Image (tube, helix red, strand yellow):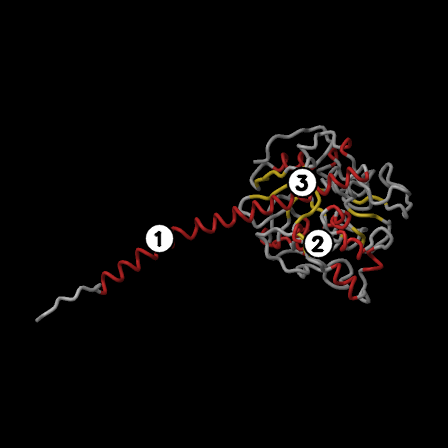
Amino acid sequence: MNRNRSAFTLVELLVVIAIIATLIGLLLPAVQTAREAARRSACTNNLKQVGMAMHLHHDAKKAFPAGFSHFWTSGAVWGWGTFLLPYMEQSSLYTQLDPASRKLSTVFVASASAGDKAALQAAVPTYRCPSDDAPNPNTLFRFGSGAFDVATSNYVGSCGELGWANRNSDDPSLVPNYGPKYSHDPGGMLFGVADKAATATGAIPKSGPGRGPLGLRIKDVTDGTSKTWCIGERSKVNYAAVWVGAGNAAGYSANETARIIGRINTNGFFINLNFLLANSPPTAADIDNNGKIFSSMHPGGVNMMLVDGSVRWAEENVDPVIHLGMAHRNEGTVTGDTR
C-alpha cells in the first residue's frame, strides 16, 4: 500500500526561516531600546542617591561638600566623591582612606600600601552608569602624577564656567580668575575650596583656615535649587572620571581637576561633544579638553542632577545658552526646561 508522507519542502522551510529572521530583526531594536531605558533609569536612580547623600552632608555639616579640598600646592587632593562616602553606606571605605587627617597626595604615591591602593581602586556601584563600560580602575587617562590608576566614576560635579560677565573670555588677567581651579569660584556648585590647613591670598570668601572641605550652602543658590545643575554624567568617550578627587588641584587638564568636575559654555564645550572626532587630526588641546565634557552613553543627552536632588534629562541639541544658565547658581538668569 502506498502511503503519502507530508513534509516541508525546501522552499517552505526557507520561507519560514525568512519570516522568523524578519520578526527577530523587528524585535531586536525594541529589546535594545527597552534595555537602554532600564539602564538610563538605573543611572537616574544613582544620581538621586548621590543627591540624597549631598543633602545628608548638608544637614550634618550645614554645607554641601567642596568640589575638592584645595591646599594651594600641586598634587592630588580629595574630592566631593570621597566626602560623600559616609552618606552612601560606604563608611568603611571612608575610614580606610581617612581624608580627615590625611592628604591624598600622601596616599596616592607609588609606594602606597596594598590597603590604600585597593581603597583608591574600589568600585563604588553608585558612581557608575550601567550604560557605560569604562574599565575600573580608570585606564582611559592617567590620574595626576600617574602613580597608578584609581577607581572609575561616571559622574562629575558642575563647576559652572567662567564668571557670568566674563564667560566669553579666558583672559588670565581677569580679577578674580574665574577658572575652575585655584579655589576661585567659577559660578557653579562644585569647585575647589581652601582646606583648613591652607592659607593664601585670593581664596574665596569664608574659605580660609577652619572651614575645611566644605562648599556652598543652599542659601547660596539664589537662582533656585530646582534650576541649578549640581552633578552630571561623563562617559568613556570623554575618558569617564574618578571619584577619589583631583589629580592636581593647581591645574584644569583632563588628568587634574577635570577628573571630578565638568564645564559647559557657548565657546565649544557642549554636551556629548567629542573633541577627538570634531577635529582631525586632534591637537594636544583637543585631547586635553575632551576630558572636561558632560557626556553619556545614553542616546541624545545626559542625566543631570539638580541641587534639590532631582534628576533632569538634558538634551544635547538644546541651545547651550540654556545649559550655561543651568550651570550657574546666581548669575540672575533662571532658565526653563532643558528638554
Q: At 71% from the left edge and 38% from the top edge, which residue is drawn? A: 168
Q: Which mark is residue 265?
A: 3
Point out the frontmost of discs 3 and 2.
Answer: 2
Q: Quadrant of residue 319?
A: top right
Q: Are marks 3 and 1 in contact (CB under 8 Å)?
A: no
The image quarter in which residue 321 lies: top right
Q: Tell me the SS state at disc 1.
A: helix
Residue 242, label in figure = 2
Image coords of residue 333 (percent x, y): 68, 29
* First-in-chain label (3 vs 1): 1
User: Residue, x 87% and y 37% (percent of image)?
Assistant: 206
Residue 119: x percent and y percent? 75, 59
The kind of residue tagged 1 is Leu
Asked if residue 288 shows in the view, the reply is yes
Identify the residue at image location x=82%, y=38%: 176
**Quadrant where the image shows the C terminus:** top right
Mark-to-mark CA distance, 2 and 1: 42 Å
Disc ID at residue 23? 1
Taking the image as drawn, is residue 202 in sight? no
Considering only vertical position in the picture, is 336 above or below 106? above
Q: Around disc 3, counting alpha carbons within 10 Å, would you say few (fewer than 14), some (14 to 19), or many (20 or more)?
A: many
Q: Secondary structure at mark 2?
A: strand
Image position of 248 (left or right of 35): right
**Callout 2 amino acid:** Val
Labels 2, 1: front one: 1
Tell me: 249 left or right of 1: right
Q: Residues within 10 Å of mark 2 (few under 14, many from 20)?
A: many
Spatial separation of the CA atoms under disc 3 and disc 1? 45 Å
Decide which of 175, 186 is in the foreground and name it: 186
